[in-house]
Image (cartoon, rainbow, N blue to C red):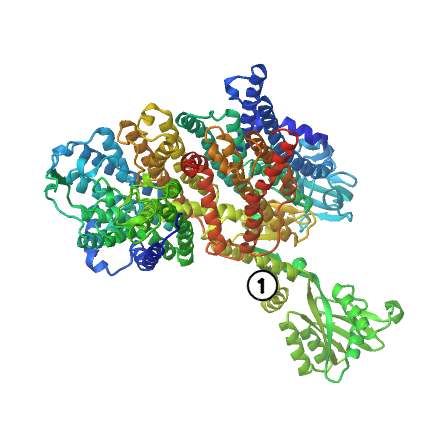
């Protein structure tokens, strides 16, 4: 906390303030009133004071400085939070020495160099016990790597060359074996470094929407600057014509200006941006630019891989369909026997289902004295031989062939059943004993239980979900309809994916996708928002603009929500900030012209005690509102999956209407407090 | 005792709005076909003229598509030439024909002011028509501008609409083609119809010299005449407003009967309102046009009612003196100062509201004599930036700028990069829209400050106190928003005011046109994002309310101090007695 306070004060540096035109104006205003206060300390009747009491000018000055400090405070808190998270990531990047190679081929001759001297393209070797000194791609070797420092996941992972898992991240540690790695980033440019720069306000680049908003805020600031600047001549003229009262003072003009310009959003803008990025880090996603996060809020098409995202990725037995003359229990028992030695998830699921349905006893494979027939690519069946019972299970055509050799045939009912299951998107597994076909086991691609609701949420937000799968169109269609995706791309290859994305983009859609393999890289590079799995290849990571450290494909949905929340928070606070101005006018205008046109007192609808207390109350409210809204800026406006129209009406009600009403109450309360302590 | 609005008043207001809105679909649909180059029932009649014009100018309407920069250059060059030609016509009026009254040439500052005024579709008149302008100046100089300046507005609007409806295109249409179509198919036929209707009501149309009449008192009175009907028609239709005679449409030869008055006041808002429908048709989503028309109407009608009510209510101080201000068979009641008895309170206040809502500026009563709050209505309507219906073309493109700003703020609140009609609104668009929004405010605030601070500026102010401030504010607001109506009470034909207001008019017109065209170009180049549930709808009640809210808040926040120091102080001073 001490660092946050120190930071808030250090940021009063003019060069730093000049980055934000709205707050810079407050800064200049504060300096001017401080000057006036200084002059009045020496000569209380100085013309520049305009006859205002010293305590009034002093208090206005005091609160103007606090307006600035509060804005700095918001930024420092957001930055502190983001940095704390980034630092814990950074800690992993301790200064280690790297073993640099001259040639890939000879890994025994290495040179010890500091990690931060490594450049893109350098070749290094990392051996058991070493920290990986930089992000890179495995060229040779295989190793188990502890990535807990980055992902928080304690189980070691395998990194090897050539496959889909050739990326290593700096800061992780090789546990066994060795790998030769080509460094893929210069110091300060790794994913982590880029992410850290997103939560440091001094280095942070503004995102496109933030730039557009800053332009609008600057335009409003220009208007209000003019309103206040021209008020002086108007006041001079009015005093002259009315022949009464005194001209509006510089102090009051500056107070009015600071109240009118959008300081609430201006002061919180950078805190909102930083905390958006910080929420992303919290979700264990590393983005290379703020632009990508903002774009995530804009996507209207999500490409989701079927396996792992929509389904669990392995098929499970859900039902037994016996052939005519066979009971379901007979089929289940036979299926269980044939699968006992089958260690695939599908095989295990058959055992589990058979035992569950018919209460079959647990039995150990070893006690059966049976011979197992392992699955072979040639036969495409597997099974068991116990006491002359040859129980086989496999694809329908493979079993049909074997049964036919033994003189049996597949009953028509079973063939119908096989087709039926395939049509529903399942995998039919035929079971036969010797020459007799016993029936079919229905293996199903299990759709994740919560995915349907999440996809429905996406649809409410106007985002189409597209399932990508290598399955045939029939199977794909069945799963697509069960999961509730809007469309699917079946028998997808890297080429068809790329083509599909381009097609979507030509129609004006913004496409997001998740990928991990090298063959995903072109599609990732083409999509507008691309999240690469940390477990994936270096090529995929480089093509993507975000990396998910958890390698969770559903994370994309969270990223979209974070992007949307970022924009919503900015929009809502802008609306609030502008809506506030109405009440401030009602407080300040009658007060500022109280001596020239006492009739304007009729506009003092809040019944504020005195001109001084009215102006002071408006300034104090303006400063306190920044503090009051810091939690909202950090947390973001609550996001709900619902259509845009509904979202607008709620936010408009809360921040628009609320923004008009709140300051009337707030200023009145502050005025009452000021009167109570005798400052009216 | 004061009164709200008479039953007859309500009836007239309702009739006016009903007829105005009934014209929206037929006229708007017709204009959409014209600007899309489709055949209309007028094509057989005037098609030859259109083709002939293209042949003479060497323009191919199907091929010559302009980038926004070319379009802007064409607009600026065309307007610059129009300005220079008009300036010299006015300066050398004494050397030119059709000058039976032998009127002298205008001073350079008045010529500058008048040329700026008519080229920018403002029609601020620092002079009295019948005592200053020859028939040649009126017809060749001013009336030509009355046709081409609204046509420029239409062209810029059509370019912006194309920007919104085209996809990934570099061009936004052809300026010359849009100008020709606007004139030949829209302004000329409508002006002809209105001129004939006005002629039937007794609006004068002659080339004869002024007539001398012997009055009952036995003295000679010169009655100014001239080719008025043809000018009045386009003055009203083209949101020009520059009267043939000094007192504009309060003059019996310019606006003789209640029917003539109805036609004239209807003509003010006719094209601007119908353009909303044109917009809807051209962007292939009529709901978008309707929602904009609704937003305009929601702002206009309450202000109109307020204005009529204030005038009908009269002055509370009279009530204290037991002066009857109630409407009866014998008197219209209310505040009749500065109003013609043949129009009464309702039609005067209706005209005042319509003429300032549109950037017309013609008058049939003297706004200076309105009650403080009644007179604040025209002032406020101008301060909206002439987008409540607004000028021909300029009203809707100004409104679309506000729509874009509204979409930006509202769009952020739903968590997406804001988009309007599928076009993403990004920093360049916001930059251009902000410039267009800022310009009138800057001109009015700084212009008024200069006027009240300088000796030359103060010299023109006749009235004391807050009303003097209101008068200056009104004049600068009128020029800075290209309206052209005057509050009177300000001696504006001085080198100081001629220059100040002339500069305001030129900046206000062209510093909005250029960013608007830039906006059109940027939007045309963009892809169109397909609509989804995540898209902010811009055609429902919520959006209309948001748009109205943004327009009102931005205007009010910009002008509260000036309004407080002028009309509001006057009002409280008045009720204080």
**Mark 1: few, some, or many residues within 10 Å (few <14, many ≥20)?**
many
Picture quadrant where residue A385 is located: bottom right
Please say whether residue B359 is visible from this viewpoint: yes
Picture quadrant where residue B215 is located: top left
Viewer-side residue, B354 vs B31: B354
Residue in view at x 56 percent, y 33 percent: A614
Viewer-side residue, A355 vs B315: B315
In the image, residue A563 sits, relative to residue A3, either above or below, namely below
Viewer-side residue, B259 vs A527: B259
Q: Which residue, as the protein is rendered here, is positioned at the far right? A: A367
Q: Is residue A1 left or right of residue B268?
A: right
Residue A638's x, y, as percent?
63, 49
- The chain identifier of the residue carrying mark 1 reads A
Q: Is residue A506 left or right of residue A668?
A: left
Q: Is residue A18 left or right of residue B10?
A: right
The quadrant of the rendering that contains the C terminus of chain B is top left
Q: Is residue B378 left or right of residue A322?
A: left
Q: Which residue, as the protein is rendered here, is positioned at the far bottom? A: A325
Residue in view at x 19 percent, y 51 percent: B52
- Which residue is identified by label 1? A490
Residue A390's x, y, as percent?
79, 76
Viewer-side residue, B493 vs A152: B493
In the image, residue B56 sits, relative to residue B109, either above or below, namely below
Please say whether residue B424 is visible from this viewpoint: no
Residue A410's x, y, as percent?
69, 81
- Number of marks in the rendered image: 1
Q: Which residue, as the protein is rendered here, is positioned at the far front? A: B322
Residue A195's x, y, as percent?
64, 39
- The secondary structure type at the circle numbered 1 is loop
């Amino acid at each position: 906390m001490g660092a946050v306070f120190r930071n808030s004060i250090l940021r009063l540096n003019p060069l730093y303030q000049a980055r934000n035109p709205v707050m810079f104006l407050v800064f200049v205003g504060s300096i001017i009133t401080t000057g006036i206060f200084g002059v009045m300390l020496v000569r209380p009747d100085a013309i520049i004071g305009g006859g205002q009491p010293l305590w009034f000018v002093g208090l206005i000055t005091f609160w103007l400085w606090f307006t600035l400090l509060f804005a700095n405070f918001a930024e420092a808190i957001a930055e502190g939070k983001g940095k704390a998270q980034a630092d814990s990531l950074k800690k992993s990047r301790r200064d280690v020495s790297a073993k640099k190679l001259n040639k890939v081929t000879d890994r025994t001759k290495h040179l010890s160099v500091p990690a931060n001297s490594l450049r893109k393209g350098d070749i290094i070797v990392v051996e058991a016990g070493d920290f990986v000194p930089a992000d890179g791609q495995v060229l040779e070797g295989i190793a188990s790597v502890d990535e807990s420092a980055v992902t928080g996941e304690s189980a070691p992972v395998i990194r090897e060359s050539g496959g889909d898992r050739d990326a290593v991240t700096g800061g992780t540690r090789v546990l066994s074996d060795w790998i030769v790695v080509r460094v893929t980033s210069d110091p300060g440019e790794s994913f982590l470094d880029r992410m850290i720069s997103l939560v440091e306000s001094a280095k942070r680049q503004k995102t496109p929407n933030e730039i557009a908003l800053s332009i609008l805020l600057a335009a409003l600031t220009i208007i209000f600057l003019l309103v206040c600047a021209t008020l002086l001549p108007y006041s001079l003229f009015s005093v002259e014509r009315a022949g009464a009262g005194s001209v509006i003072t510089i102090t009051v003009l500056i107070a009015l200006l600071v109240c009118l310009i959008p300081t609430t959003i201006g002061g919180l803008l950078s805190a909102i941006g930083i905390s958006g990025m910080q929420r992303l880090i919290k979700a264990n996603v590393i983005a290379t630019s703020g632009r990508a996060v903002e774009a995530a809020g804009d996507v209207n098409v999500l490409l989701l891989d079927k396996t792992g995202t929509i389904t669990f990725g392995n098929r499970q037995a859900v039902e037994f369909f016996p052939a005519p003359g066979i009971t379901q229990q007979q089929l289940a028992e036979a299926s269980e026997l044939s699968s006992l030695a089958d260690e695939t998830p599908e095989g295990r699921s058959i055992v589990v289902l058979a035992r569950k349905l018919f209460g079959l006893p647990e039995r150990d494979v070893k006690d059966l004295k049976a011979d197992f027939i392992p699955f072979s690519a040639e036969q495409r069946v597997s099974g068991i031989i116990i006491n002359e019972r040859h129980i086989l299970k496999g694809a329908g055509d493979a079993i049909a062939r074997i049964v036919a050799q033994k003189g049996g045939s597949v009953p028509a009912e079973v063939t119908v059943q096989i087709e039926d299951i395939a049509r529903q998107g399942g995998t039919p597994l035929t079971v036969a004993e010797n020459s007799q076909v016993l029936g079919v086991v229905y293996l199903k691609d299990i759709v994740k239980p919560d995915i349907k609701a999440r996809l429905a949420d996406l649809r409410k937000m106007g985002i189409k979900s597209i399932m990508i799968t290598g399955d045939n169109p029939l199977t794909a269609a069945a799963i697509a309809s069960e999961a509730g995706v809007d469309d699917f791309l079946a028998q997808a290859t890297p080429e068809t994916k790329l083509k599909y994305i381009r097609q979507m983009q030509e129609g004006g859609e913004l496409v997001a996708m998740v990928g991990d393999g090298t063959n995903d890289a072109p599609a990732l590079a083409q999509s507008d928002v691309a999240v690469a799995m940390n477990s994936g290849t270096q090529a995929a990571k480089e093509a993507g603009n975000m990396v998910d450290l958890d390698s969770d494909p559903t994370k994309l949905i969270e990223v979209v929500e974070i992007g949307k929340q970022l924009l919503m928070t900015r929009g809502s606070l802008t609306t609030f900030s502008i809506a506030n101005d109405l009440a401030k006018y009602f407080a300040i205008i009658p007060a500022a012209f109280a001596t020239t046109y006492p009739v304007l007192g009729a506009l003092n609808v809040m019944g504020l005690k005195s001109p001084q207390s009215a102006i002071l109350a408006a300034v104090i409210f303006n400063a306190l509102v920044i503090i009051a809204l810091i939690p909202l800026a950090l947390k973001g406006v609550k996001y709900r999956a619902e259509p845009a129209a509904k979202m607008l009406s709620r936010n408009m009600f809360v921040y628009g209407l609320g923004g008009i009403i709140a300051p009337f109450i707030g200023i009145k309360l502050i005025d009452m407090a000021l009167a109570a302590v005798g400052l009216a | 005792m004061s009164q709200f609005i008479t039953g007859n008043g309500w009836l007239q207001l309702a009739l006016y709005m009903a007829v105005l809105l009934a014209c929206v679909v037929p006229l708007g649909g017709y204009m959409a076909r014209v600007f899309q180059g489709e055949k209309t029932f007028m094509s057989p009649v005037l098609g030859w003229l259109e083709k002939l014009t293209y042949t003479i100018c060497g323009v191919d309407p199907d091929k010559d598509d302009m980038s926004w920069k070319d379009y802007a250059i064409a607009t600026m060059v065309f307007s610059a030439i129009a300005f220079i030609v008009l300036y010299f016509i006015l300066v050398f009026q004494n050397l030119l024909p059709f000058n039976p009254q032998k009127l002298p040439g205008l001073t350079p500052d008045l010529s500058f002011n008048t040329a700026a005024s008519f080229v920018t579709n403002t029609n601020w008149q620092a002079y009295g028509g019948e005592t200053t302008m020859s028939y040649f100046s009126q017809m060749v100089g001013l009336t030509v501008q009355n046709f081409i300046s609204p046509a420029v507005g239409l062209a810029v609007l059509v370019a912006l609409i194309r920007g919104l409806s085209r996809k990934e295109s570099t061009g936004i249409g052809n300026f010359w083609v849009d100008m020709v179509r606007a004139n030949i198919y829209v302004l000329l036929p409508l002006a002809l119809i209105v001129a004939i209707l006005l002629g039937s009501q007794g609006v004068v149309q002659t080339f004869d010299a002024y007539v001398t009449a012997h009055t009952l008192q036995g003295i000679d009175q010169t009655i100014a005449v001239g080719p008025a009907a043809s000018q009045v028609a386009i003055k009203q239709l083209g949101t020009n407003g520059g009267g043939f005679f000094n007192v504009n449409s309060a003059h019996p030869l310019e606006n003789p009967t209640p029917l003539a008055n109805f036609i004239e006041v209807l003509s003010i808002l006719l094209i601007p309102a119908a353009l909303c429908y044109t917009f809807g048709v051209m962007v292939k989503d009529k709901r978008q046009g309707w929602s904009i028309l609704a937003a305009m109407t929601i702002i206009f009608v309450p202000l109109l009612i307020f204005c009529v009510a204030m005038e009908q209510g009269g002055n509370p101080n009279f009530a204290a003196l037991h002066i009857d201000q109630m409407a009866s068979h014998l008197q219209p009641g209310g505040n009749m100062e500065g109003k013609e008895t043949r129009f009464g309170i309702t039609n005067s206040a209706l005209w005042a509201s319509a003429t300032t809502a549109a950037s017309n500026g013609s008058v049939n009563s003297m706004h200076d004599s309105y009650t403080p709050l009644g007179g604040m209505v025209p002032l406020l309507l101008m301060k909206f930036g002439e987008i409540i219906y607004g000028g021909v073309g300029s009203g809707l493109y100004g409104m679309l700028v506000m729509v874009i700003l509204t979409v930006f703020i509202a769009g952020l609140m739903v968590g997406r990069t804001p988009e309007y009609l599928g076009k993403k609104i990004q920093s360049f668009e916001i930059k251009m829209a902000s410039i267009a929004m800022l310009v009138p405010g800057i001109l009015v605030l700084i212009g008024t400050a200069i006027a009240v601070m300088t000796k030359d500026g103060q010299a023109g102010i006749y009235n004391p106190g807050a009303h003097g401030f209101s008068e200056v504010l009104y004049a600068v607001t009128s020029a800075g928003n290209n309206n052209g109506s005057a509050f009177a009470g300000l001696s504006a034909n001085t080198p100081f005011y001629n220059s100040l207001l002339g500069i305001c008019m030129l900046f206000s017109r062209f510093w909005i046109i250029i960013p608007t065209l830039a906006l059109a170009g940027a939007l045309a180049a963009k892809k169109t994002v397909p609509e989804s549930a995540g898209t902010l709808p811009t055609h429902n009640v919520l959006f209309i309310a948001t748009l109205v809210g943004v327009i009102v808040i931005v205007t009010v926040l910009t002008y509260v101090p000036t309004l407080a120091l002028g009309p509001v102080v006057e009002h409280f001073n008045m009720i204080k007695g």
